[in-house]
Image (cartoon, grey):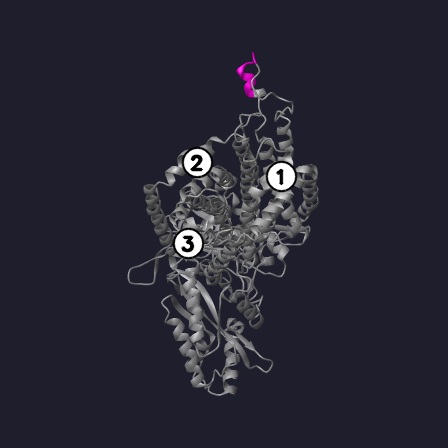
Amino acid sequence: MARLRTDCIERPLCMCYEMMGHFIGSHPWWFLIAPLIISAGLGSGFYLLEDRMSNNIEEQFTPVDGPAKLERHYIQETFPTNDSAFSRSRLSTDGSYATLIATSGRNILTMESLQYILDLDLKVRSMIVYFENRSFEYADVCAEVMGSCTSSDILDIIQHSADNIGTVNLTYPWYDSGFRNVPLFLSLGSVKLYEGSSLVESAEAIQIHYYLREDNQTRTGLWLESFINLFANKSSTSIQVSYSTSMSMQWEFMKSPSSVIYLFSITYATAITFSIISCWRLDNVRTKVWVASCGALATGLAVLSGFGALLLLDQPFVMTAASCPFMILGVGLDDMFIMISCWQRTRVLDGVPKRLADTYKGAAVSISITTATDALALFLGCGSPFGSVRSFCLYSGVSICFCYLYSITFLGACMALNGQREAQNKHWLTRARVPEDLPSRSSKAFSICCVGGSYDRITEKEATEPLSLVFERFYGPFLTHKWVKACVFVFYAGYLSVSVYGCFILKEGLDIRNLALDDSYIVDYYDDQRQHFSAYSYNVMVAVKHPFRYWDEDEQKRLRSCISNFESLNFVNGTLAWFLSFLQYANTSNLHVGSPEAFHTHLLHFLELNSMFKQDINFTADNNIQASRFFVQTLNKTTTKDLMVGLRDTAETCPVELVVYHPAFVYLDQHTVMMDNAVQTILVAVIVMLVVSLVLIPNVLCCLCVAFAICSVMVGVTGFMALWGINLDSISMINLVMCIGFSVDFSAHISYSFVSSCKSDVDEKAVDALAHLGHPILQGALSTVLGVVALSMSGSYIFRTFFKIVFLVITFGLLHGLVFIPVFLTLVGVCGKWC
């Protein structure tokens, strides 16, 4: 069969890089200084970092065009909030509030426990806060109902006196106060009822909310900060108190970057140390200590330039992008190891320009493939509907481009200068000329410290590294043995089976508590909330969008039918509708409401008696009903995604045009787009990676192997991600996008070396590829893992997730590059004809 090649790009690219290497080798100082100047200039963008920070949780971790945001806009325009008649269930946002949960291992409805809670409540309400040399307290900023601050239902029931608990018969979940039905499930948690009744026997938790007006955000923020400080050092032996505010998650989330700052120094110190040790040679002339140090410096310059350029271009910086430097460090060091490996295969007696030209010819295409795939995968992620993913992908993609630029300029110049030192046989540290062989009468210590410059006289190349010899003489022949190949296939089948199983159990959605640090006070609050108050879920508002003839019996049946459809859902506990309450009031009072005039007349009187319902009806100027809403109380009997989707589907089947909304839906919308967006991004990326490989690797079959490696690694990472307890959310999606590019790296290196080998037998080709690139690939993998291992110690879920997924990507990428792909390439018989 004729050879099928696509080297129309690869050949001229090799020639271009060969000429570039020769030019850089001839003028190294230009390419050493220019990147430093560029980095210094672009790095000035870091002065704008604080102004470019964009860490609003809603903006960055919810879909940009999520349907709930449109629904919220409609609700806010149609049913504006009434500051003088506060209603928690009628808020279009979470509102401004502080809350506490008091828990006890025993019954908390005792006089002693309630008195402690009443004392806490008094301290909160009497807390003095200062703003602009004036003091204020809760009564000055609280949300009001009928001219009074909102209060806790349970405290109102006992009339703020612990002694009254013995005289009150509490009923759960609703308590009839004589004036209204009180939702006691919002105040009491882990309730135990007397057998066969709704009377409360005991409860383990009490929750109290303090809602604030939103007309002055500065004063509100100060009061919330004082609330947090009040409880920060308060403890009780019998009553445990957890607390949170409407701003707590945002404030705690913004602490995450500072929590990993110290890890940067640990990471870079570890990576630089590893690079120096990996590139250390016993030969005092041939050692690559300075090249290793410059390789780490080049990655730092890339981050400085990439971040600085985007900050100067007014691009928002999201906290998730803070993990980029850890990734860039691994990418840059991987390229460096490849270039050093190629340099060592050049003739020692050639001039520096010639050696660098041969280095670039051998390495440039290989690192170009990995850079192109990494950058393209990240830039494809910029189309994500999540701001956090966009920011990460943009900052990472641009930084990888700078990393590549500095690898072929700054690092190449460093290699050229180091090559000039080697050509003059100078010591790596003292730069003094040293003898190649041990002089007579010299001690052994002299040979260790002051001798160097030897090379293989037969091949005229530097001595092969011991680990490369291991790959060539032991590992390669072992891997290509027929029985070992069979074992590799069995092992791969097991790997794929476990991975596919993990994909089926993968969960979706970001748990909002994961945005806070592990030691945050709000973690305790979320734990108590989940343990004691999880039986009841959201009180969802359902809006009737268009004018409706509420007085018409046929129309009433249509609306009642819609309400019945909602109530028939297994996770719906009941509904609260002004419409049904008004009809009940009319029937009780024997009122005729069958005509428009009578309906509106009696409705206005009804609303005077039930003022809260006024907020549920949108009247036109002539008192016609433009729109209205009712409420559906849900139970925690299904996932939040199924709850939201179920309510929306029910609304769509209704003959009346409805809008279903709750503030939490803004965050739950991620469930509706996460999986589809992830699959779409991965498929497009795989196609793009295949095109890049076809262009740069001169063999169609091996390009298909690279595409296979991408899919296989992605399945493995996704499956084991689920087994490691990581959900598919906007944070893990960031890493999956990055994984697409990383999964190409090792397989592309081996595949390109395989097809470029001059050997004729496929097994010999595999051994040759492993001998040439096994060592640098292993070095690159270890350096990448070391670049992120410090993040495993982070107290932030975001950075720990980054570590876990990078670890999986590198582990499976290395497994494919050094085990699966070499074996698969040798087992495809036609490869021997095509290559």
Count of marks, rendered view = 3
Q: Which mark is residue 471?
A: 2
Q: Is residue 558 above or below residue 18?
A: below
Q: Earlier in the sequence, mark 2 or mark 3?
A: 2
Which residue shows up at 55% across the image and 42% down it?
362
Instruction: Tell me the mark number nearer the camera, choosing from 3 and 1.
Output: 1
* Lower position in the chain sequence, tag 2 or tag 1: 1
Residue under label 1: 412
Q: Are marks 2 and 1 in contact (CB under 8 Å)?
A: no
Which label sits in the foreground, 2 or 3? 2
Q: Position of residue 102 (x, y in %)?
A: 44, 51
Residue located beneath label 3 in the image: 530
Mark 2 secondary-structure assignment: helix
Query: The disc labelled 1 sits on which kind of residue?
Result: Gly
Residue 691 percent location from the top left of the image: 52, 56
User: How many angstroms separate mark 2 from mark 1 (CA)?
Assistant: 27 Å
Do we see residue 258 in this rendering? no
Residue 695 rendering spot, x and y as whole percentages = 54, 54
Question: Residue at coordinates 47% horizontally, 30% vertically from top-left?
Answer: 466
Region rendered in magenta: 440-448
Q: Is residue 230 left or right of residue 649?
A: right
Three-letter code, disc 3:
Arg
| Residue at far top of view | 441
- Give the distance between the C-alpha atoms of the residues marked 2 and 3, in whole angstroms: 54 Å
Residue 418 part of the magenta-drawn span: no
Q: Judge by depth and name the residue closer to the eye, 194 or 663.
A: 663
